[in-house]
Image: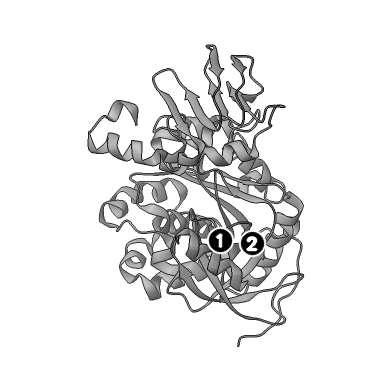
Amino acid sequence: MMSGTVKGWHMTNNPHLYGLILAGGGGTRLWPKSRKKTPKQFLKLLGEETMFQVTLKRFNEFIPGQNIIIVTTKRYASDIAKQAPDVPKQNIILEPDKRDTALAMLTGALYAMSLDPKAILVNGAADHLVANKKEFMRVMRVAAEVATDDKHLVAIGIAPTHPSTAFGYIKIGPELKHLGNGAPVFQVAKFTEKPNQSTARALIATGKYFWNANNYVWSAQALQASFKEHMPSLYQLTKDLPKLKPDKFMQALPAIYDQADTISIDYAISEKAKNLLLIPGDFGWNDIGEWQVVYDLGKKDPAGNVIIGNGQSGSKDIFYLDSQNNLVHTNNRLVALLGVNDMIIVDTDEILLVAPKSKSQDVKKIVEQLKKDQVEDYL
């Protein structure tokens, strides 16, 4: 068992703290609103702000704009620039191609290292929501304290609220005493990929499993060292990036991405690392990964319907009789329902989706079939 002490510090006073936001994903389960041209992080699904704006605002509570780094693609560069005016333009990293989360997180960390060799990064996705921001910051404070020693990688494990089949799970080992300040810190024992319902129920029953939200905190140096040990080929491709100025850094990326493997951070590093720790996070985290979740989090009218129109709840573009517990996303034209219950109805300029809420996770199968049929205009 490892043990040790960590000097306490306040996040707002730590100049080495950076936020890395991944904002290049798609979100196929939220099709047809989430498409290549308008991915879910730039949609107003639960209020007046996009999920990216909500995420950025949460990070800005304890990390200044000049220390925020955003990894995205050229397709979304203008959206990012408009919605993140306080983030320096050079801090918006445009990936030449999609190579999954391993290279995205490594690239962001090495860019932070080029600015500050002692950089510590709080990693997050642009499409995740947090209900309790105060608790979120408390947990991140502990994780950042642990990460200051450059020896540990830290995963934030989300306390499961139900046996979800949509997330991977992380099993905890022994609790490490005297590490961190104000929260338990555990050695990570193993990762389990997305389970079926019965397996998920059994995992939760043990009390030793947490959802894997890809919410990591680590120093740039510790992450680079992990790639050197577990993915030496990718380390070799990227090892000189921290020596480059921002403009040269960006110019070096196409050649690297051409040669790099497509692999997630979990497969590349997390499942192999012996120095990975877990801190439980119980701050109302949610991945808006399907329409059922939008319904669950949405404001319901007396009939249990969630109505969204033009990014706002409570749209007037709907008329219904004897219809309950539906999610309806209108699009500037009247949607009329009669005797319709427990359905998802999403209207867009080009596509109308109608499906039972119970089939919410299967929406991605439509996208997969469209890809197979090469119907690119609707993706």
SS of the residue under disc 2? loop
Give the residue at x 55% y 25%: 328
- Relative to residue 207, is residue 270 drawn left or right? left
In the rendered image, the vertical position of residue 287 relative to residue 36, given as above or below: below
Q: Locate residue 277 relative to residue 182 in the image: left or right.
A: left
The CA distance from mark 1 to mark 2 is 7 Å
Place residue 38 in its image quadrant: top left
The residue pinned by badge 2 equals 159
Task: Sort mark 1 into few (<14), some (14-19) or many (20+) by Cα contacts within 10 Å.
Answer: many
Location of residue 304 by image quarter: top right
Secondary structure beneath label 1 = strand
Left or right, 250 with respect to 287, comes to left
Task: Determine if residue 123 is in view.
Answer: yes
Contact between labelled residues 2 and 1, with CB atoms less than 8 Å apart: yes
Disc with the residue nearer the chain's start (1 vs 2): 2
Task: Look at the picture and state if 23 lies above or below 167.
Answer: above
Circle 2 crowding by C-alpha within 10 Å: few under 14, some 14–19, many from 20: many
User: According to the image, label 1 marks what residue?
Assistant: 211
**How many numbered badges does the structure rendering display?**
2
- Provide residue 187's location: percent of width, then percent of height: 58, 78
Estimate the x, y position of residue 84 in percent, counting from the top left: 59, 36
